[in-house]
Image (spheres, rainbow, N blue to C red):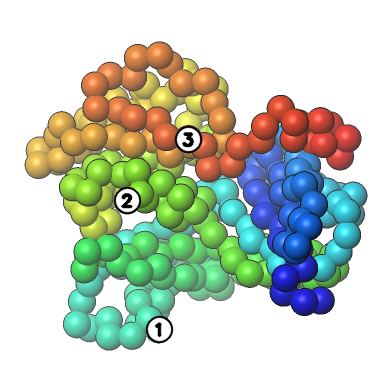
Amino acid sequence: MSPRWRSETAILLTPTRVALRQSVRGLRPAPAHVAGLALDGAERHWEAPLAALDGLLAAARGRGGEASVVLSSHFVRYCLVPPSDLLATREDEVRFAQQNFVRIHGAAAEGWSVRVGPGLAGGAAVASGVERALVDDLRALLARHGLRPRALQPALMALFNRARGELPAAACRVVALEPGIAVSALLAPGWRELRSQRVPGPLGEALEPLLARERALEDEDAAGIETCVLPLLPFAAAAALGEGVRVLEPGWNESPADAAGEREAA
């Protein structure tokens, strides 16, 4: 197939929602096909979301093309890789991150798929660790549907990359938010103080106390900086979250017109 006519499929994989957006490039591109399924997410495991994705792809129109996947932070572990003359190559950084994951999460992390992103402003880089079985099963599923994986992005990095142009040039705190989990980091302007925490209940109710906990954990030199909330999915935020808090547009949004296609797929 000519690259001009290649289809592109964007995929969202979380414990509570699986969705896809399929488009075709060409002289007369067809309207995007959007479908999604809500899951109970009780186990916070990836087997049920992969099964749901298999069904959505089977019902999607056409086959082939490239796929880009945004992976929930429920399925990813993060750590910071500091700048160091001892970490001269990307392989050195990956080994450092793998050892850090093993130290924190135990021997199971030895088999994780680990990637390290570029550092910001000469500062620390963010490493992500994903179970190898999830990566292998996802690749096999995509191959069964004729899709070539183009990108596998952890939710934190997907949301940051999407919002980067809207973030303050100076220091700020970012909170990558999705049902059940939040990942926060201080950008000053490089990555600092990366941490994850569980988020119980509806996001609209949980966000204010979550931000209060973040403020309580801040260093003195980070007090008073702007907080930018980067939601993965749309949610109803409280009207007043306090001064210096900004909620950006969700990373994955489905319009009312797309919802009809979602119901058909369901």
First along the sequence among labels 3 and 1: 1
Q: Is residue 211 visible?
A: yes
Residue under label 2: 194
Q: Is residue 51 left or right of residue 236?
A: right
Q: Residue 252: x and y, percent?
A: 59, 41
First along the sequence among labels 3 and 2: 2
Looking at the image, which residue is at 9% across and 42% down? 221
Residue under label 3: 249
Q: Residue furthest top?
A: 239
Find numbered disc 1 in the image and state the secondary structure of the residue it sits on. Answer: helix
Q: Residue 186: x and y, percent?
A: 26, 47
The image quarter containing residue 27 is bottom right
The image quarter containing residue 209 is top left
Relative to 38, residue 150 above or below: below
Q: CA distance from mark 3 to mark 1?
A: 35 Å
Relative to 130, residue 176 above or below: above
Q: Which mark is residue 91?
A: 1
Callout 2–callout 1 Cβ contact below 8 Å: no
